[in-house]
Structure formats: C-alpha cells, structure tokens
Image (cartoon, rainbow, N blue to C red):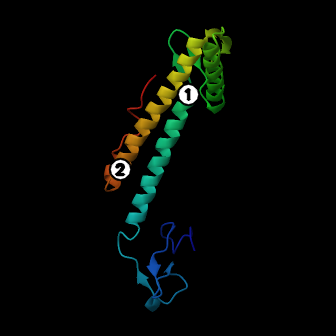
Amino acid sequence: GSGRLIRGGPLMTRPTHMLADGSLVYPDGYDSADLTPLPAGYWDAADFERARADKWVMVRAIRDRLIDAGLHVDGIGTFDSDAAARQNVLGAASAAMAAQAAGAPFEVVWTLRDNSRATLDAAQIIAVQIAGVTRIDALHGHAADLRVLIQSATDVTSLAAIDIDGGWPEF
C-alpha cells in the first residue's frame, strides 16, 4: 500500500504498475503476469501540474502576507492593513466623504500600527484609503504577472526558475 517500504526499497507513494483494466496498483499481492510496469515519466505531467499549482499557492500567500503587512503613508505613519483594519479605513473614508459632501468638518483620531495616535482630517483619511487600494492593486497586479509566467512554464526547470520572492512593489 501507499507509503510502505517495499523489500527494503525506497518509500513508495504512488502505484508503480497497471492491471489490464487500467487500475494503478503496487506490485505486491499481484501475479507478475497480471502487471505492466508504468513507463518511465508516467507521473511527470502530474508532478508538473502539482508543482505549478503549488507555486501559485505560494504566490498568493506572499501577496496576502504583503497586503496585511502594514501600510506606510508619508507624513502620517504606518497603518495596520489586515482585513479588519482595511474595513475600518474604508468606513472612516466614507464618513469623511459624507462630511465633505455636507460641508461639515471631519476629524478622526487613529491608532497607528505602533500604537501611536494621529489626528486625521477628511483629506488625510481619504488619502490613506486611496493609498491602501493602490497598494493592493499593485500587489494583485504583480501576482497576476507571476501567474502568467507560471502558466507559461513548460517544464519543472522553467517553473523553478520563476522568482516569486522578488519584484514585489514596495510602499
């Protein structure tokens, strides 16, 4: 069965033989006359597609980590940028726009990532929202570019050559 040592050989994780009905099996327990060894490279395509899918999962994880890694806005400081923080900024920016539309003053005291506090007017909190959206768009854009490269890879070597750690936009 899967994951067993066979006669002191390597750990086998996939069937190595095929029965006449097309079933993939391990050789033990079967008459050798009923078995056909799988050809060399039988699993290569599956391995490549799995490697491609795994690389895309890694890209998305990097993108999501960077989205949540904080947002620095010059002249104000660094904001938290996880999903809850992004929602809070969106709410404050919406309130700021409503206040502007009504001709009312707007001010919010915001706790920054380092727990310092900053007093922001409507224009500043709207600028924070715009900076956050711009950053997320750039990170998604880079991830999409990497996905094109991943999908264009023709073999494991070209897939491995794709640098998923470099080239991310810095803010």
For the N terminus, the quadrant is bottom right
Residue 151's label in the rendered image is: none
Is mark 1 in CB contact (under 8 Å) with mark 2? Answer: no
| Mark 2 crowdedness (10 Å alpha carbons): few <14, some 14-19, many ≥20 | some
Dividing the picture into quadrants, the one containing residue 163 is top left
- Is residue 2 positioned above or below 87 on the image? below
Q: Earlier in the sequence, mark 1 or mark 2?
A: 1
Q: Which residue, given by chain and number where applicable, does mark 1 sit on? A: 69
Q: Give the percent coordinates (x, y) of residue 46.
A: 43, 64
Per the model, the C-alpha gap separating discs 1 and 2 is: 27 Å
Mark 1 falls on what kind of element? loop
For label 1, count other residues whose C-alpha is less than 10 Å away and answer few (under 14), some (14-19) or many (20+). some
**Residue type, mark 1 in image:** Ala
Question: Residue at the spot x=45%, y=86% of the render?
Answer: 35
In this rendering, the answer to whether 42 lies above or below 54 is below
Determine which residue is flagged by label 2: 159
Relative depth, front residue between 19 and 13: 19
At 65% from the left and 24% from the top, the residue drawn is 91
Q: Secondary structure at mark 2?
A: helix
Q: Residue at x 50, y 70 (%)?
A: 14
Q: Quadrant of residue 143?
A: top left
Q: Position of residue 113 (x, y in %)?
A: 62, 19
Instruction: Name the residue: 48% across, 44% down.
Output: 58
Give x and y (percent) for residue 51.
43, 54
168 vs 4, left or right, is left
- For badge 2, the amino acid type reads Leu
Q: Position of residue 157 (x, y in %)?
A: 32, 52
